[in-house]
Amino acid sequence: MRPASTGTGGAPGRFEPLRPSELDAEQRAFHHRITDGPRGRRGDVPLVGGDGSLLGPFALMAIVPALGDPVQELGAAVRYRGELDPLVREAAILLVAAHHDCVFEWFAHEPAARRLGLDDSQLGELRDGRPPQGLSPERGQALLAVNAMLRTGSLDDGAFAETRAALGERGLAELVWLTGYYSMLALALAVFDPPEIPGPER
């Protein structure tokens, strides 16, 4: 995975998140929904930098709040309203991050994966794009499916059947939406290249 971006990975000054004082009324309302919503209440994902500006994909969603708000609502549903095994969810997000070389997604979700019990060796396997050793067959199959979707854009009949048997149809559906959602965020981050890791106040 590439080094942490400083906001200049694509072109110097490609995108700089707005400080709270620079937001218009619609953007301020969006900022409030992010920081006071389920992510802010749980505190499990970094949301703002030292100057209060939104971080990573949240800063990009604020460009057009009318679109960014439904996007962040989908993300909140994926994380907080689904029934997918939390370890599978966080490991799958890290596989997406590794596949797309997305530093922010890895930075934001590695701590949660550690809290759920993944160790350095298993995280290293995820960073290399491989489902880690030592997981149950059901968890392993879920992560194999994520890898297949990332590589091919689908699942063949065998992988579909095996993953549906391991997770149920609902769990497989959640895994598909998760893989697509975090891939979309990775694309947005690659295009706009905002500062990805919280730094000192500007």
Image (cartoon, helix red, strand yellow):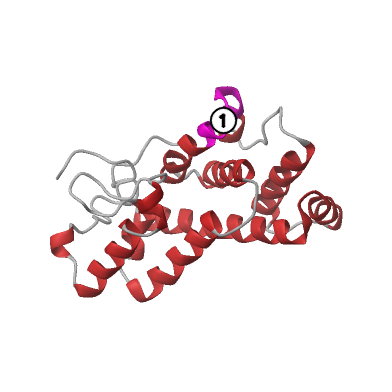
Q: Residue at x 35, y 45 (%)?
A: 46
Quadrant of residue 103 within the rendered picture: top left
* Quadrant in the picture for the C terminus: top left
Specify the principal SS of the magenta part.
Answer: helix
> How far from the left and from the top, in percent, is residue 57?
38, 56
Whether residue 141 is in magenta: the answer is no
* Boundaries of the magenta span: 113-124
Instruction: Depth check: give the residue in front, 169 or 106.
Output: 169
Element type where label 1 sits in the image: helix
Q: Residue at x 56, y 43 (%)?
A: 90
Indicate whether 117 appears above or below 103.
above
Indicate whether 10 appears above or below 22.
above
Indicate whether 125 appears above or below 182.
above
Instruction: Depth check: give the residue in front, 72 or 115.
Output: 115
Question: Amino acid under label 1?
Answer: Leu
Q: Residue at x 20, y 44 (%)?
A: 50
> How far from the left and from the top, in percent, is residue 154?
72, 59
> How far from the left and from the top, in percent, is residue 104?
41, 44
Dot 1 crowding, Cα within 10 Å, few <14, some 14–19, many 20+? many
Relative to residue 20, is residue 75 drawn left or right? right
Instruction: Depth check: give the residue in front, 40 or 2.
Output: 40
Instruction: Depth check: give the residue in front, 16 or 59.
Output: 59
Relative to residue 179, is residue 141 drawn left or right? right
* Residue 1 in view here: no
Relative to residue 197, is residue 162 drawn left or right? right
Q: Residue at x 86, y 53 (%)?
A: 158
Whether residue 121 is in magenta: the answer is yes
Q: Circle 1 is placed at which residue position?
A: 123
